[in-house]
Amino acid sequence: MTSLPENTGTKLGLVIDLDICVGCQACATSCKEWNTGGYSAPLSDHDPYGADPSGAWLNRIHSYEYTRDGTSGTLHFPRSCLHCEEPDCVTVCPTGASYKREEDGIVLVNPDTCIGCKLCSWACPYGAREYDHDDGVMKKCTLCVDRIYNETLAPEDRSPACVRACPTGARAFGDLGDPDSEVSRSVAARGGFGLLEEFGYKPVNRYLPPRDRQPDPPAPSPEATPTPEPDGSALEALFAWVDRTLTARS
Amino acid sequence: MHPAYSVIFFTTASGAGYGLLFWLSLATAIAPDALGRWPSLAMLAVALVFVTAGLLASTFHLGHPERAPGALSQWRSSWLSREGVAAVATYVPAGLMGLLWLLGLAEGLIVPLALLTAAGAVATVYCTGMIYASLRTIRQWNRRDVPWIYLALAAATGGILFGLLGGLAGVAGRPIPMLTLACLLVAAGLKHRYWTAIDADPGAYTAKMAIGIPGLDTLRPLDAPHTMPNFVMREMGFTVARKHAEKLRRLTWIALFAAPALLLLLGVLTGLAVPVYLLAAISAATGVVLERWLFFAEAEHVSQLYYGRSRA
């Protein structure tokens, strides 16, 4: 079970547009809301309203400042499981609880056989797996496997909770193994990329880079500020005296 | 990486236990009658107590210890599973060997059982080392020499235990301290090379690679995703101050390598066994726990690139 499938024709995954993500955390909270009652239930929290809150979340949003080609910007960066094609988080599992589905490539943890050894989280370079201290098993993004095939939901709701919740449409869900799918086409059009490709797990999820911007306007310099000509008034003499006095004292 | 006490105790105690089991089995295979029935049985019991205590401790950090038998199933891909299989398998020849000693039976069967037990001990410790060495996310662990360091330290600490118990039973032989000394020196050499190498390696991955956007000039974390540390930060983000690490490395050199080696030499020269081995055992035990703590504390995880580390 822990051995990886030879080939998954379908590669379900997310495409996240970093150009329009506003960092509102709606994807993270809707993920938590769905999954604490869904496949991954419970997603336990400790001291949630106290001084040291912590808990298992499957989606985390970082914010950065970046510069690129003379432009600068703020970047909101959602991070969750990338459902890699060749991840060691699956092969290191001693029980077979961590597995990759042959039919659609989703990487899941079986909560009934996981022994909570945490080795899979050690094997993930993306920090995508979080241990649930109350449940004693590892938790991770399920790509909302309990929504996307769920025929009791309205068709428009059969997508991951994070995608459904995103107010700017920065998240898309689809088959990245099909070059003609809408997500694959947007990746091709926008130069979509994977995270830490150098590492070699072949992540499936893609990110779309921020679009090119106007160069930043030059910062105002003190020399550029015009100084008014002196007019010889009493008020000006007073200010000049105050300036001299203060300069001498300091 | 967070140094979990249960895992440190497990790897050091079971390492010494398998080391003792290895030397006992090797001595039995070479000269089945040299140690005598009851000293052999006593040493086997001590070795299995160390091994079993370690294995039990390792289940303390599991979320569901009651499901641990399931961990024997994935030996095709998982070094942790292979370690479990090797550990359980080693009990079989070791237990049969003990049974034969207990009943005073079948001299001829002892040798193959002893060889199997020795092989099982080596295989189990090798698998323990490979659990860490197979993780590409941690450059301080993902090295060819890691399982060999585990093996050399298991042989050295087990050899000291073997010498101590042999001395107590009055059956201490000359080759054992020399072999133990050789293992200590090999372990010291490997560990020196290991520390030199990890200090020189700045890490192949950067925060920019972790974000992946092509052509970034600078990248600066602005807001963390959560106000307090989460599991990933607590488990994978443990860091030890460099000056503390250096001090602890020096202590490890003294307690694990220098002091036991000098004591073993003293034992060879003076013929003293028990007091020398007792001191060596206490010193090496302290040293190997320090070494293992550092093995975890100095390990840097690639995921921390998302939490402020610039290289890993």
Image (spheres, helix red, strand yellow):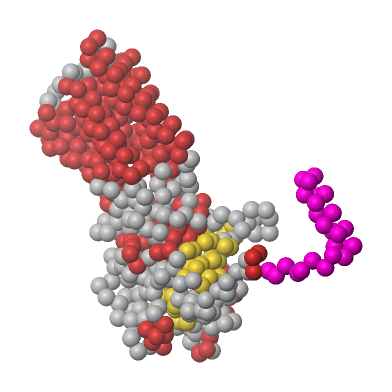
Nearer to the camera, B92 or A60: A60
Nearer to the camera, B65 or B253: B253
- The location of residue B143, given as percent across then percent down, is 28, 48
- The residue lying at 23 percent from left, 32 percent from top is B186
Instruction: Tell me if residue B232 comes above or below residue B189 in the rendering.
Output: below
Q: Main secondary structure of the magenta part?
A: helix
| Image quadrant occupied by the N terminus of chain A | bottom left
Outermost residue toward the left in this view: B108
Instruction: Tell me if residue B233 comes above or below residue A70 in the rendering.
Output: above
Judge from the rendering whether residue A25 lies leftward or rightward of residue B100; answer left or right.
right
Residue B167 seen in render = no
Whether residue B54 appears in magenta in the rendering, the answer is no
Residue A177 seen in render = yes
Query: Which quarter of the picture shows residue B183?
Result: top left
- The location of residue A238, given as percent across then percent down, is 87, 58
Q: How many marks?
A: 0
Query: Which quarter of the picture shows residue A119?
Result: bottom left
Outermost residue toward the front in this view: A232
Outermost residue toward the right in this view: A234
- The residue lying at 45 percent from left, 56 percent from top is B310
- The location of residue B136, given as percent across then percent down, is 33, 56
Q: Which residues are magenta?
A: A225-250
- The residue lying at 30 percent from left, 77 percent from top is A8
Query: Which quarter of the picture shows residue A129?
Result: bottom left
